[in-house]
Image (cartoon, helix red, strand yellow):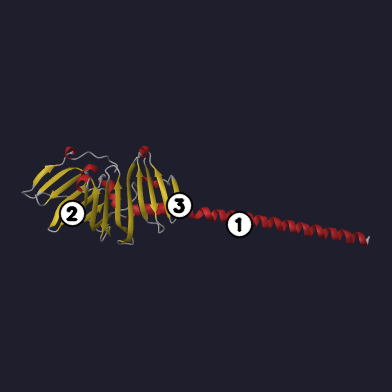
């Protein structure tokens, strides 16, 4: 009887050891699977977080940047022309802008857009021209073939459209340190926004419906422009439709300083010659650049 009890105890202990080993193996497998799943989440999670952070940052910038003023050097290439001029630029959302083209003798031309109207003043001839603001007018006098609201957003390094920020991007891609967010639009157009490793917007590319190229703009040399807002020191945009490239080198951009509405209103003097700008005076341009 004693021998039988010893045998039973031995079998019981052996069974317990085996069961314990099996339990430990199950726990180890569970831990391994858990760690593996965690590792998989860690691979995917940063990209999702980065996309979220970029979209939030873009929306925050859209809410934070309202105006900018700076001296600049503008370089234009297109239509057989290539020249550089010094300018004083003032921008204010939604669609107000003033560009003073400088010469060695002072102001050579003033272009002001606001309230859906554009005014062009030639001091040398004391002539003031007025008309409806359009992409064609800005192309002729400011060398930017875009409507004033789109041109203002481009120069302020904002997203092309506030409304698109309410939805997540249609797709994302990572290229080295850069991440690209693509937003498909209801009209068939698409915007690609590329951000550098620091999270600053460095490129916007518009593709029109049917795959036609709209415009492409590159931002670089970001600096603090006041209030902790980073602003690009250089903006270079190309417009395949016109074959033109325009580059702005901002010398001292200041953001969100007070800009009186009168900045965008040009009033004639008593002897100023007044003309009306019409669509017949320039080639018609599409609303999109």
Q: Specify which label sits upstream in the sequence, 2 or 3.
A: 2
Q: Nearer the viewer, residue 74 or 256?
A: 74
Q: Which mark is residue 100?
A: 2
Q: CA distance from mark 2 to mark 3?
A: 40 Å
Q: CA distance from mark 3 to mark 1?
A: 25 Å
Q: Nearer the viewer, residue 41 or 80?
A: 80
Q: Which mark is residue 174?
A: 3
Percent of width and height locating residue 172: 44, 48
Residue 170 left/right relative to 74: right
Q: Is residue 91 something that shows in the picture?
A: yes
Q: Which mark is residue 191?
A: none
What residue would you read off at disc 1?
A: 35
Q: Specify which label sits upstream in the sequence, 2 or 1.
A: 1
SS category of the residue bearing label 3: strand
Percent of width and height locating residue 76: 24, 51
Residue 181 left/right relative to 29: left
Residue 75 left/right relative to 200: left
């Amino acid at each position: 009887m004693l021998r039988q009890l010893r045998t039973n105890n031995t079998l019981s202990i052996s069974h317990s050891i085996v069961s314990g080993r099996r339990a430990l193996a199950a726990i180890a497998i569970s831990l391994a699977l858990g760690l593996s799943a965690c590792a998989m989440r860690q691979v995917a999670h940063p990209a999702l977080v980065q996309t979220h952070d970029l979209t939030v940052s873009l929306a925050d910038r859209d809410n934070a940047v309202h105006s900018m003023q700076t001296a600049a050097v503008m370089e234009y290439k297109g239509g057989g022309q290539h020249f550089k001029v010094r300018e004083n630029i003032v921008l204010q959302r939604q669609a107000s802008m003033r560009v003073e083209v400088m010469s060695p003798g002072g102001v050579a031309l003033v272009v002001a857009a606001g309230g859906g109207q554009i005014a062009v003043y030639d001091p040398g001839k004391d002539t003031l021209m007025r008309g409806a603001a359009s992409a064609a007018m800005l192309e002729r006098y400011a060398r930017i073939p875009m409507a004033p609201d789109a041109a203002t957003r481009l120069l302020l390094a904002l997203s092309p459209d506030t409304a698109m920020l309410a939805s997540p991007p249609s797709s994302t891609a990572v290229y080295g340190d850069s991440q690209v967010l693509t937003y498909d639009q209801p009209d068939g157009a698409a915007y690609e926004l590329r951000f550098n490793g620091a999270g600053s917007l460095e490129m916007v590319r518009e593709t029109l419906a049917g795959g036609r190229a709209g415009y492409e703009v590159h931002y670089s040399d970001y600096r603090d422009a006041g209030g902790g807002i980073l602003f690009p020191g250089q903006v270079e945009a190309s417009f395949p439709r016109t074959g033109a490239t325009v580059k702005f080198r901002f010398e001292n951009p200041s953001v969100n300083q007070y800009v009186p509405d009168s900045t965008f209103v040009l009033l004639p003097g008593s002897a100023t010659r007044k003309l009306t700008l019409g669509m017949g005076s320039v080639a018609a341009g599409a609303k999109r650049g």
